[in-house]
Image (spheres, coloured by chain):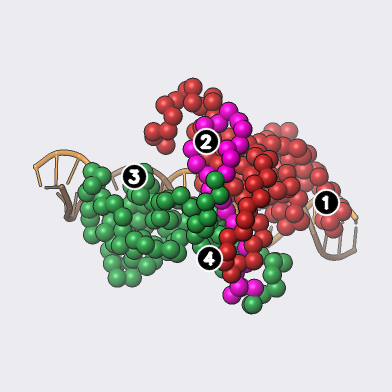
Chain colours: A green, B red, C brown, D orange
DNA sequence: CTGGCTGCAAATCTTTTGCATCCTG
DNA sequence: CAGGATGCAAAAGATTTGCAGCCAG
């Protein structure tokens, strides 16, 4: 992962903690997940700083914000193009590495990127519950 | 669009107004868009009722909730499978009707559905601004 | 009539912001 | 030592909920 100093930003203990937490993290955590986990051993950590750091990383392209979860934003430190699969029961999100090379829709848009969201139910949840139904 | 009476729900003037507003609507409006538009000529309309109606429709499969806009949920009365394209400047959303028949990612998930989000800049916005940059 | 629906307002949840103080470079 | 970063708390948005009264079926 890029270091902050390389992109003209200051490195602080708080930012280091966020960077370390996210490095190689495949959980697609929410801001709250990140805050909770870090503040366990870093009591002087505020929500504002988490968001501040996430925004800085996002603006410098070393973090991607996911909209696949309708409830809140999820963050992905993996910046190479890929897609996602989410379990609608346990809300777990997995990476999907398949390259679908999609044809651009014909329109007057200049297409910048795309993202595929798969929705499903993981084996663990299927064993526990009736597939689908409530929510 | 399905009528509420067909699915065991009551039809009220408020619900009728929402139904009428959404019928054939291709704007992918937010809850606030819907509320604002309807309350113009239907002063006795509350936010709670808009959400109540949207939730009822969603639960009965006659409305789809979109997560493509990171800021808020958008609603789409078109329930046949399709994808979307959003201008990152003006936030306009267009339907994408191409059938990409995506291969399911190999995983222990039971895949229920998928949705492709395209991001880009529409011609109108490209004329006005430097493409990308801030935001 | 009666239970589902409405409107209002308060509550929740996520994310953002203002500002005094701190500390990296 | 200057300006960016932090922490706190309050604010802003979006969405949900509690509840008394209303009205569609």
Q: Which residue is mark 1?
A: B4
Q: Which chain is disc 3 placed on?
A: A
Tell me which chain the residue with mark 2 is part of. Answer: A
Residue toward you, C21 or B8: B8
Helix, strand or loop at label 3? It is loop
Query: Residue A32: where, in percent of width, then height?
Result: 43, 61
Judged by depth in the image, the label closer to the viewer, 3 or 2, is: 2
Label 1 marks a residue whose chain is B
Residue occupied by mark 2:
A111
- Looking at the image, which is closer to me, B2 or A127? A127
Residue at horizontal 83 percent and vertical 48 percent from the top: B2
Residue A92: image tag: 4
Work out which quarter of the rendered image holds the N terminus of chain B and state it. Answer: top right
User: Which one is earlier in the sequence, the residue at label 3 or at label 2?
Assistant: 3
Q: Is residue B74 above or below residue B120?
A: below
Q: Secondary structure at mark 1?
A: helix
Q: Secondary structure at mark 2?
A: strand
Residue drawn at x 26%, y 44% as measured from the top left: A7
Residue located beneath label 3 in the image: A60
Residue B109 in magenta stretch? no
Is residue A23 in view? yes
Contact flag, marks 4 and 3 (Cβ < 8 Å):
no
Q: CA distance from mark 3 to mark 2?
A: 20 Å
Left or right: B107 as drawn, with respect to B11: left
Q: Position of residue A106 (x, y in %)?
A: 61, 32
Q: Residues within 10 Å of mark 3 (few under 14, many from 20)?
A: few
Q: Earlier in the sequence, mark 4 or mark 2?
A: 4
> Is A124 included in the stretch rendered in magenta?
yes
Q: Do the CB atoms of the residues marked 2 and 1 lie less than 8 Å apart? A: no
Give the SS element for disc 4: loop
- Marks 2 and 1, Cα distance to the nearest angstrom? 39 Å
Residue at 34% from the left image edge and 63% from the top image edge: A21
């Amino acid at each position: 992962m890029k270091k902050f100093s390389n992109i003209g930003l200051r490195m602080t203990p708080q930012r280091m903690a966020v960077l370390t937490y996210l490095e190689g993290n495949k959980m697609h955590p929410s801001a709250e997940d990140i805050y909770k986990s870090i503040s366990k051993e870093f009591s002087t950590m505020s929500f504002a700083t988490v968001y501040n750091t996430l925004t800085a990383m996002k603006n410098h392209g070393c973090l991607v914000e996911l909209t696949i979860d309708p409830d809140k934003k999820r963050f992905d430190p993996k910046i190479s193009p890929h897609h996602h699969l989410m379990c609608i029961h346990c809300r777990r999100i997995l990476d999907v590495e398949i390259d679908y090379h999609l044809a651009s829709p014909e329109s007057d848009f200049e297409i910048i990127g795309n993202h595929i969201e798969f929705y499903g139910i993981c084996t663990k949840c299927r064993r526990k519950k009736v597939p689908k139904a409530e929510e």
